[in-house]
Image: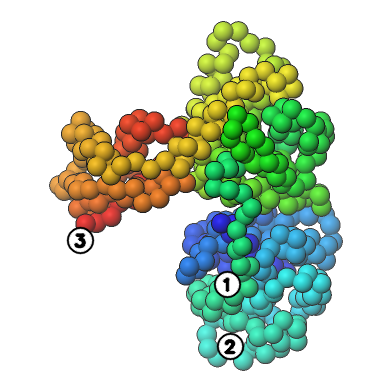
Amino acid sequence: MPKPTVAIVGRPNVGKSTIFNRIVGERVSIVEDIPGVTRDRIYSSGEWLTHEFNIIDTGGIDIGDEPFLSQIRQQAEIAIDEADVIVFLTNGRDGVTSADEEVAKILYRSKKPVVLAVNKIDNPEMREDIYDFYSLGFGEPFPISGAHGLGLGDLLDEVAKHFPKYEGEDYDEGVIRFSLIGRPNVGKSSLVNALLGEERVIVSDIEGTTRDAIDTPYRKDGQDYVIIDTAGMRKKGKVYESTEKYSVLRALKAIERSDVVLVVLDGEQGIIEQDKKIAGYAHQAGRAVVIVVNKWDAVEKDEKTMKEFEENIRAHFQFLDYAPIVFLSAKTKKRTHTLLPMIQAASESHNLRVQTNVLNDIIMDAVARNPTPMHNGKRLKIYYTTQVAVKPPTFVVFVNDPELLHFSYERFLINRIRDAFNFVGTPIKILARARD
């Protein structure tokens, strides 16, 4: 189910990053009492009651030397184009400013739901200061305090009222949806064309040719697929062009709709830091992952080259140790036939359920081979394990004290489950719960 997207819009220094961090629940955005300190557009996920949503801190758009008004217009345009609901954030201590009025004019034309919030209302006596904000024309302003976390519940209640109703997707349950992500010009569109056997997606050596996510239904050997091609994700700090600045968010939306994500690397250029950040989006989303090394035809190689490249990938992508690696060339179509079987295996693992009695036999055998650790004189006891979800496979382990399940032993259990049931290409989650 696609998550709705919320964007926080407002002039600089009204507290967008502080509110963003409060909603996300962790310190993701840099917070500093200096206008324009947020140098990166930040995306994350939030949750309120039964609602999950994506959230954008639009303070992260840095337009370089462009005039101040142009900067806030660019930020507002991101919200207009990408968000389902816009939080228009103002500063109660400053009152209504001309910059607020300019943002309001832009948002009037958006035809998107706009919820007006007045930040820095830190005590009840200041609530009388919000009445001037009715003049902005967005109805009742919600007084909040990012510094103290006050009023956010009422604000999010109102935001959630405007979330679009999910009507479902047109794809059958048996369809495997996979997306291709990677920095620009690694050959994602060429790979789509190689799989389809026809020129369905524009291919160019110019970075960023693909501007949006494109769904392409496809059938091969009796299996139905939907290929989601995405615009290349540019390195942070370079997402300035008006045609480019939405690419990362759209790629994140594509990941969210996918069963399997192909992380496409450039075999000729090798691995750079941005590749790891892009791959991290798929891992954090809990999707099955296949690492694809493209342009393998352009690599000078001997009998050791592939093994050395794979070792290099494992060293850089330790968090994707479960992801299989496929070497191919979209240009020559060499080894492209190996990709779809790997996608299918990863999808099956991503959706695999295991029998509870067999699962507990495996866990008890693992504990017998490698006894549970002790902490402060207390030993972890595992009573029972059951699978509670798929996509990704998620297991609840009932124990005497969840704090005793150390990360290293959790990883040991995950690897034991992976080996026992041949999970391929999918992350596995373990949740520790105290037994009543």
Q: Which mark is residue 370?
A: none
Kindly tell me whether residue 48 is visible in this rendering. Answer: yes
Task: Give x and y (percent) for residue 234.
Answer: 71, 42
Q: Mark 3 = which residue?
A: 436
Nearer the observer: mark 1 or 2; the answer is 1
Q: Which residue is rendered at x = 61% and y = 81% of the image?
A: 142
Task: Give x and y (percent) for residue 391.
Answer: 47, 46
Q: Which residue is rendered at x = 65% and y = 85% of the image?
A: 140
Q: Which residue is rendered at x = 38% and y = 43% of the image?
A: 353
Report the coloring of the rendering: rainbow
Q: Quadrant of residue 328?
A: top right
Give the distance between the C-alpha atoms of the residues marked 3 and 2, in whole angstroms: 47 Å
Chain-order first, disc 1 or disc 2: 2
Q: Which mark is residue 160?
A: 1
Chain-order first, disc 3 or disc 2: 2
Q: Amino acid at mark 3?
A: Asp
Kindly tell me whether residue 145 is visible in this rendering. Answer: no
Quarter placement of the C terminus: bottom left
Q: Quadrant of residue 277?
A: top right
Assess disc 2: are there few (<14), some (14-19) or many (≥20) residues with their C-alpha within 10 Å of its C-alpha: few
Q: Amino acid at mark 1?
A: Ala
Q: Mark 2 = which residue?
A: 126
Quarter placement of the N terminus: bottom right
Chain-order first, disc 3 or disc 1: 1
Q: Which residue is rendered at x = 78% and y = 36% of the image?
A: 200
Element class at badge 2: helix
Element class at badge 3: loop
Tell me if residue 88 comes above or below residue 324 in the rendering. below
